[in-house]
C-alpha cells in the first residue's frame, strides 16, 4: 500500500472518510497530536489499529465525536460529565464514562468504561462528520515512540501501512489530551494535558490526580489507565533528566556531559533558552523558555524524534516546573527517560 499525504480540502476529507467507512486507517490531525483514525463501531477496523501500532490489546482507545449529542449513544452519561464537556469541549479533554454495548470491547481493552473526546481541530471535526461515525483514534505513533505532531511523523511510522494521512500542519498543542475518569468517585485525572487540574477544579472541585502521573506504576497492581504502565514516548537515544536548583543542575549536567563525551558517546543537552549560557553552546539544544512552557509542550515530541535523526546516543535534560502544563510535560518526559531522573541537590 502506498501512503498518500493529503491537503485538508473537503474533497480530500471525503476521500479519507470513505476509506475509514471501508474499514481502513487514516492519519488524522487534531489540536493535540495526530491520531490513527478508524471506525470505532467496527471491531475489524479497531483490530487494525492495535496491529499497526504494535499496541497491547489491553490498552484502550479514545473515541472521538464531532457532536455532543453522540455521547449519549456511546455511554451512560452523568451530570458531571455534561458539566465538564460544556466547559471544555470541543478541546483537549477526554472523559471516561461507563460504556454502552454499542462500543466493541476491543475499543476499551475489555474495561467497562469508554474514553470520549470532542477535538477542537476543524479538520478533525470535518473528518468525523464526513464519516458519520464515532472515530477510535490513539496517537499515530508506533507503540512506545514519541507521539506525532506533524504529518511527516505519522508518515515515518506508518508509511505503507495506511492509505492516507491528512496534513493540517503542526499540532497546536503538541501533547495529548487530559484524560479524566468521571465514571466513579473520587474523580481522577489519569493523564495530565493542557487543561490543568487547576482549571478542572473550578468546575468540579473534588478532582484528584492519579498516583501514577509522575511515578512508575507497580507492575503487580492493576493500573487505573493501562497506557501509564509502559515505558513510553521514548527516543532511541537514552534520556536522563536532572532536577534541582538552577546552578546545581547545570553543574551536574556539565559533569555528566563530559563523562559521556569522553566515553565516545554522542551527547547533547536539553536546556531552557534562559539557561543556555550555563552550557557549551555546541552541545546545547534549546527547548524553549522556562517561563512559557507551552513552547516546550509544542515541540517536545519533535525534539525527541529529532535526536534520533541526528544519531545522538545520550541526552541530559533540564526539567520543567510542575504547575499548569508543566505537569503534562513532566509526565511525558519522565516516561521518555524510563523514570531515569537525578536530583542534583543531593
Ligand atoms: O489527544 C489525544 O488524546 C490523542 C488524540 C489523537 O486525540 N489520543 C491519544 O490516544 O493520546 P492514546 O491511545 O495514545 O492515549 C489514550 C490514553 C491511554 O493512556 C489509555 O490507556 C487511556 O487513554 N484510556 C483510554 N480509554 C481508557 C479507559 N477506558 N480507562 C482508562 N484509561 C483509558
Ligand atoms: Mg499514545
Image (cartoon, rainbow, N blue to C red):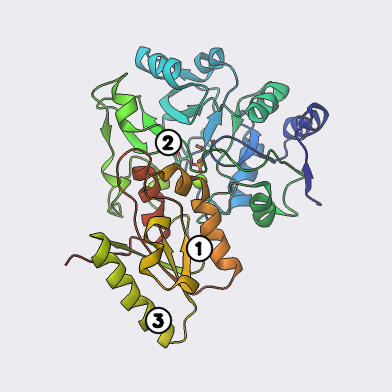
Q: Which of the pair 304/68 is nearer the observer?
A: 304
The correct choice, above or below, for 27 with respect to 132 in the image is below
Label 1 belongs to which residue?
235
What is the residue that sits farthest to the front in this orientation?
277
Q: Where residue 194 is drawn, which disc sits there?
A: 2
Label 3 belongs to which residue?
260
Name the residue: 28% across, 53% down: 220
The correct choice, above or below, for 211 with respect to 76 in the image is below
The correct choice, above or below, for 45 with respect to 2 in the image is above
The yes-or-no answer for disc 2 within 8 Å of ligand 1 is no
| Residue 134 horizontal/vertical position (percent) | 61, 25
Whether residues under marks 2 and 3 lie with C-beta atoms below 8 angstroms apart, the answer is: no
Which mark is in front, 3 or 1? 3
Q: Is residue 83 left or right of residue 123?
A: left
Quadrant assignment, res 224: top left
Q: Earlier in the sequence, mark 2 or mark 1?
A: 2
Disc 3 and disc 1: Cα gap in Å?
18 Å
Dot 3 lies on which element?
helix
Name the residue: 48% across, 31% down: 92
| Residue 182 horizontal/vertical position (percent) | 35, 24
Q: Is residue 161 left or right of residue 312?
A: right
How many residues crowd around disc 3 within 10 Å: few (fewer than 14), some, or many (20 or more)? some
The yes-or-no answer for disc 3 within 8 Å of ligand 2 is no
Q: Earlier in the sequence, mark 3 or mark 1?
A: 1
| Residue 46 horizontal/vertical position (percent) | 61, 38
Amino acid at each position: 500500500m502506498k501512503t498518500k499525504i493529503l491537503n485538508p480540502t473537503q474533497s480530500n476529507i471525503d476521500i479519507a472518510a470513505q476509506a475509514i467507512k471501508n474499514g481502513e486507517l487514516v492519519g488524522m490531525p487534531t489540536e493535540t497530536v495526530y491520531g490513527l483514525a478508524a471506525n470505532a463501531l467496527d471491531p475489524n477496523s479497531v483490530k487494525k489499529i492495535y496491529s499497526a501500532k504494535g499496541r497491547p490489546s489491553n490498552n484502550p482507545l479514545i473515541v472521538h465525536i464531532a457532536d455532543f449529542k453522540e455521547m449519549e449513544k456511546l455511554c451512560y452519561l452523568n451530570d458531571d460529565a455534561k458539566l465538564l464537556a460544556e466547559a471544555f469541549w470541543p478541546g483537549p479533554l477526554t472523559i471516561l464514562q461507563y460504556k454502552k454495548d454499542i462500543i466493541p470491547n476491543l475499543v476499551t481493552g475489555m474495561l467497562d468504561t469508554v474514553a470520549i473526546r470532542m477535538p477542537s481541530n476543524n479538520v478533525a471535526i470535518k473528518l468525523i462528520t464526513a464519516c458519520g461515525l464515532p472515530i477510535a483514534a490513539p496517537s499515530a505513533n508506533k507503540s512506545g515512540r514519541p507521539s506525532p505532531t506533524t504529518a511527516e511523523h505519522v508518515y515515518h511510522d506508518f508509511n505503507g501501512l495506511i492509505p492516507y494521512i491528512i496534513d493540517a500542519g503542526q499540532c497546536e498543542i503538541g501533547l495529548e489530551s487530559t484524560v479524566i475518569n468521571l465514571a466513579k468517585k473520587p474523580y481522577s485525572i489519569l493523564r495530565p494535558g493542557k487543561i490543568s487540574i487547576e482549571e478542572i477544579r473550578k468546575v468540579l472541585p473534588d478532582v484528584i490526580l492519579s498516583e501514577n502521573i509522575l511515578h512508575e506504576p507497580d507492575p503487580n497492581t492493576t493500573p487505573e489507565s493501562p497506557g501509564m504502565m509502559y515505558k513510553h514516548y521514548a527516543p532511541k537515544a537514552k534520556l536522563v533528566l536532572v532536577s534541582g536548583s538552577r546552578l546545581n543542575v547545570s553543574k551536574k549536567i556539565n559533569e555528566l556531559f563530559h563523562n559521556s563525551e569522553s566515553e565516545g558517546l554522542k551527547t547533547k543537552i536539553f536546556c531552557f533558552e534562559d539557561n543556555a549560557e550555563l552550557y557549551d553552546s555546541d552541545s546545547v539544544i534549546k527547548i524553549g523558555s522556562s517561563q512559557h512552557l507551552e513552547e516546550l509542550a509544542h515541540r517536545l515530541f519533535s525534539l525527541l524524534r529529532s535526536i534520533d535523526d541526528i544519531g545522538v546516543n545520550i541526552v541530559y535534560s533540564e526539567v520543567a516546573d510542575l504547575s499548569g502544563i508543566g505537569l503534562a510535560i513532566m509526565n511525558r518526559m519522565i516516561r521518555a527517560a524510563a523514570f531515569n531522573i537525578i536530583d542534583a541537590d543531593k
